[in-house]
Amino acid sequence: VIAADAAPSSATLPVSFLLVSGKSVDWALEAAAIRMVMSPAEWREWTEDPAVDVAGVLGIVKDEESELSRILLVSGARGEFPLRADGQVHLQDFFRKDVLPLPPMVACASGMGGRMVEGVVMVEGRRPVIVVRPAGLQTKVYTHTP
Amino acid sequence: MHRQLIPVLMKQVWMALDAGHVQEVLSSRAWLPIPGANSEVPGVLSWRGRAIAVVDLGLLAGVAEPLAPGETRERTLVIQHGPYTMAVMVDGVREVADVHEEALRPIHAARQRFAQHEIDLNGAPMAVLDVPSVVSSVSGAEAK
């Protein structure tokens, strides 16, 4: 009997994330959820709707809007919604297995924060990354007062 | 009956924990603050391929200010109780002391929260913290 090669599990396949390197923290969002990336000026030409600053929504130290800032049009369960990302933006592949889920003790204690965070990537020798969940962000965005 | 206690230093205060709960003593470790987390469980660190909760024992015991984002201490203890694994940052650790139950006294001078007993170790009185109560406090689980 010749055994067929086992298909690689999803945990060992790389997934593309949009990584935002802010001054205080790096965060990432799965690239598949992002419909469009544009500058704040382009966004303002298109609509007057404000794009919500992700750092503010997450409750981390805010970075100011700069020439590095980008507007991400993100797809969520309730349609598309705009987020402002302040910092260097680039695509980065992570293995799904490297996105470590939050321990329940932290997820519960973080309340809404726990629902917005899918997990963390902590690799030796590089800044840790908070991986955010589009659905959790969208819920927060709709209840957020800038 | 004997108990094995591990003395830990938090700021200026020595306290003891049951060594049976301590999985590993690591050097200073960086940790990641999690958005929205409360000050008692402010973040996570990576241990053996998973993210474990960072518990601010100094704050919980009432002997230290809350850990600031990015603040580390000399040693990191990995503590386990039931299904809960957590990291506790301390300023020092001494070797495990094998003590007789009779050496444990009721709380008299110790003011730390979660203090269960007092004991003289290495010539100094210190509180013996009840790890299950600490875990219960931060996890909402019932202490056993």
Image (cartoon, coloured by chain):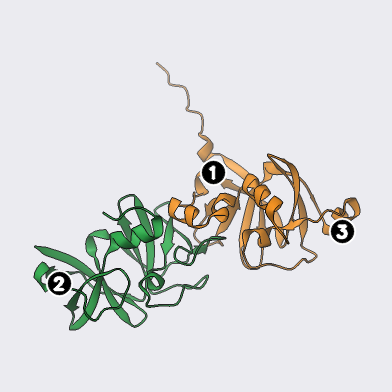
Chain colours: A orange, B green
Q: Earlier in the sequence, mark 1 or mark 3?
A: 3
Q: Nearer the viewer, residue A120 or A124?
A: A120
At mark 1, the secondary structure is: helix
The answer to whether B121 is drawn above or below residue B35 in the figure is below
Cα distance between the residues tagged 3 and 2: 68 Å
Q: Chain of mark 1?
A: A
Q: Which residue is found at the position 57% from the left and 54% from the top?
A: A112
The answer to whether B71 is drawn above or below residue A38 in the figure is below
Nearest to the eye among marks 3 and 2: give it: 2
Image x and y of residue A85, in percent: 72, 58
At mark 2, the secondary structure is: loop
Nearest to the eye among marks 2 and 1: give it: 2
Q: Nearer the viewer, residue B121 or B26?
A: B121
Screen quadrant of the N terminus of chain B: bottom left
Judge if badges 1 and 3 mark residues of a common chain: yes
Image x and y of residue A15, in percent: 60, 42
Local packing at callout 1 (Cα closer than 10 Å; few below 14, some 14-19, many 20+) is some
